[in-house]
Amino acid sequence: MKIGFIGFGKVARNLVRLINSENITFLTSAQNRSENTIKNMEESDVEILDTFKEVATLSDILISANSPNQALDVAVKYGKYSKGIYMDLNNISPKETLEINKHVNNFVDGAIIGKIDSANPILYLSGKNLESLDFLNDFLEIRKISENPGDASKLKLLRSMYTKSLSAVLIESSEVAKNLNLEEEFFDILSLTEGEDFKKSA
């Protein structure tokens, strides 16, 4: 099996590290890439091709992991050459995900929950033909949401709204506690319900 990457940043590097199999060849290209990115490619177990068009054509799974503002352009430019699964792992809106779905076949919307460089990131997926990605469970935790592209991105957006709201409330509450000279006690009492490591992480 061949897995290709359009873009080779943190996400791609760590997926190559996590998906460790002799039966999988990773492809990418140095086309218009920076010296630092090319160095990362050379230090990873990937085959470097001349163009991203070649990567798209030869890959059984083509993963777009570059930057959110390039996600749609990349899909339009290279998605048409993909004969297998086209997976977008950029942090994009559900609306843009649906737009990408118009330009590629076998589109899978992916959302990484947690830090990609952690030992056990969770990958939420939505789209058609998800059963062809079951093998990924051997390397990282996969959660299949639905056959509807955009659902994974919607869940990530909802999670982001929730966590940002909690962060805002925590900051405001800690400021009040500080003004009342009760900051230490405030975090101690929160640790009773949130866990002993809460104070350190906050």
Image: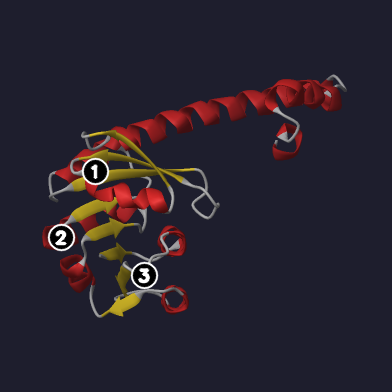
The CA span between labels 3 and 1 is: 22 Å
| Residue 60 visible, this orientation | yes
The residue where tag 2 is placed is 82
Residue type highlighted by circle 3: Glu
Looking at the image, the residue that sits furthest to the right is: 181
Q: Earlier in the sequence, mark 1 or mark 2?
A: 2
Q: Earlier in the sequence, mark 2 or mark 3?
A: 3
Indicate which label's residue lies in the foreground, 1 or 2: 1
SS for callout 1: helix
Residue type highlighted by circle 2: Ser
Colour mode? secondary structure
- 188 vs 68, left or right, is right
| Residue 72 visible, this orientation | no
Q: Position of residue 114 (x, y in %)?
A: 51, 43
The residue where tag 3 is placed is 22
Q: Kindly indicate whether the residue at mark 3 contacts the one at mark 2 (C-beta within 8 angstroms).
A: no
Q: Residue at x 30, y 47 (%)?
A: 134
Query: Could you classify mark 3 by the number of other residues whose Cα lies within 10 Å: few (under 14), some (14-19), or many (20 or more)?
Result: few
Q: Position of residue 98 (x, y in %)?
A: 20, 39
Q: Quadrant of the N terminus?
A: bottom left
Q: Residue at x 75, y 26 (%)?
A: 191
- 200 vs 66, left or right, is right
SS for callout 2: loop
